[in-house]
Image: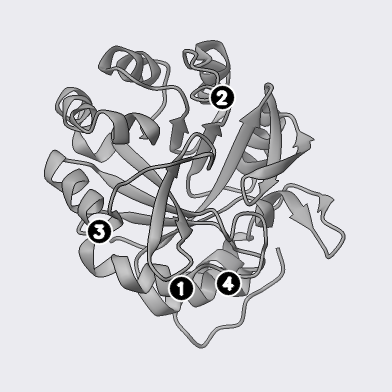
């Protein structure tokens, strides 16, 4: 039976784990491998790791880092960063990764989505769409860590991805990244009816109540977060955390149960 998924998202910068606010001001929060070990112990549903340097620096994925992550990880692992070819994607899958995430490459070469899906299966191909609110309504799509605005229409791009065989779409709110004031529910309400594949939301979660609200409103959906799972308390002390098994079950069971402490 399909259920909502609660997914930590780890950002890798200069080989370290960082967290950003609105895609800026990255703060070092630890070693990626140590974080994976902790999420193993806490039995995370999935794990998403995004290398935010690879595309900006126009370099290959760091295969050694990916291999180390995949070897350590005991949950489904999604990796993104620097993937531009079917060969690169296949090499990453052969290292033990279950899903690959495309972003700018899917925008620059949408056919890559279909080509990778044909090679490894639709369910393993994820596209992350980084969006930012327009001043007068609607959303723009950005690439390269929010520094390059595209001319794509969000709804049309979602439809194109699905026609090409994308297996999952991640909607990442630049405005809400690291702010920890809740997901952009109006954005999700606008686009969820358009999406016929698994959908994950990223950007804004500051508490388990935010995840609970997202699940209660939209049902079976992926709830991803970065700051929520690496910070603790109002002073944002670094502490890797994840809902306990009971708490996670209560988050997804029904609308009447209370959220328990992490």
- Disc 2 is placed on an element classified as helix
Sort mark 4 into few (<14), some (14-19) or many (20+) by Cα contacts within 10 Å: some
Look at 53% across and 35% down and name the residue there: 49
- Disc 4 is placed on an element classified as helix
| Residue with the mark numbered 2 | 69
Q: Earlier in the sequence, mark 4 or mark 3?
A: 3
- Residue 147: % across, % down: 53, 39
Q: Nearer the viewer, mark 3 or mark 2?
A: 3
> Spatial distance from mark 2 to mark 1, Cα to Cα?
32 Å
Tell me, for residue 185, which label it has, or none.
Answer: 1
Residue 219: image quadrant is bottom left
119 shown above or below 134: above
Residue that sits furthest to the bottom in the current view: 256
Residue 186: image quadrant is bottom left
Q: Nearer the viewer, mark 1 or mark 3?
A: 3
- Left or right of 107 on screen, residue 246: right
- Residue 12: % across, % down: 63, 30
Q: Nearer the viewer, mark 4 or mark 3?
A: 3
> Spatial distance from mark 4 to mark 1, Cα to Cα?
10 Å
> Spatial distance from mark 4 to mark 3, Cα to Cα?
25 Å
- Left or right of 111 on screen, residue 99: right
| Residue with the mark numbered 4 | 210
- Residue 26: % across, % down: 72, 39
- Residue 89: % across, % down: 33, 20
> Spatial distance from mark 3 to mark 2, Cα to Cα?
34 Å
Q: Earlier in the sequence, mark 2 or mark 1?
A: 2
Q: Nearer the viewer, mark 2 or mark 4?
A: 4
Look at 30% across and 55% down and name the residue there: 154
| Residue with the mark numbered 3 | 155
Assign the N terminus to one quadrant of the image: bottom left
Q: Are marks 2 and 1 in contact (CB under 8 Å)?
A: no
């Amino acid at each position: 039976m399909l259920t909502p998924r609660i997914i930590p998202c780890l950002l890798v910068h200069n080989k370290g784990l960082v967290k950003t606010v609105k895609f800026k001001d990255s703060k070092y929060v630890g070693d990626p491998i140590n974080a994976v070990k902790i999420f193993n112990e806490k039995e995370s549903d999935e794990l998403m790791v995004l290398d935010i340097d690879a595309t900006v620096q126009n370099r290959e994925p760091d295969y050694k880092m990916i291999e180390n992550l995949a070897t350590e990880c005991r949950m489904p692992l999604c990796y993104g960063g620097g993937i531009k070819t079917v060969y690169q994607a296949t090499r990453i899958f052969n290292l033990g990764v279950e899903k690959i995430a495309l972003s700018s490459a899917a925008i620059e070469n949408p056919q890559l989505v279909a080509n990778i899906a044909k090679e490894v299966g639709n369910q393993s191909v994820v596209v992350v769409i980084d969006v930012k609110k327009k001043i007068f309504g609607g959303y723009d799509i950005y690439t390269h860590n929010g520094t390059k605005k595209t001319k794509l229409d969000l709804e049309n791009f979602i439809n194109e991805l699905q026609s090409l065989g994308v297996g999952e779409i991640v909607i990442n709110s630049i405005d809400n990244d690291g702010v920890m004031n809740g997901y952009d529910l109006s954005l999700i309400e606008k686009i969820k009816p358009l999406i016929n594949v698994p959908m994950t939301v990223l950007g804004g979660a500051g508490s388990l109540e935010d995840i609970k609200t997202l699940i209660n409103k939209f049902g079976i959906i992926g709830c991803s977060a970065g700051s929520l799972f690496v910070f603790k308390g109002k002073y944002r002390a670094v502490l890797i955390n994840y809902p306990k098994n009971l708490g996670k079950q209560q988050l997804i069971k029904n609308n009447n149960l209370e959220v328990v402490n992490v």
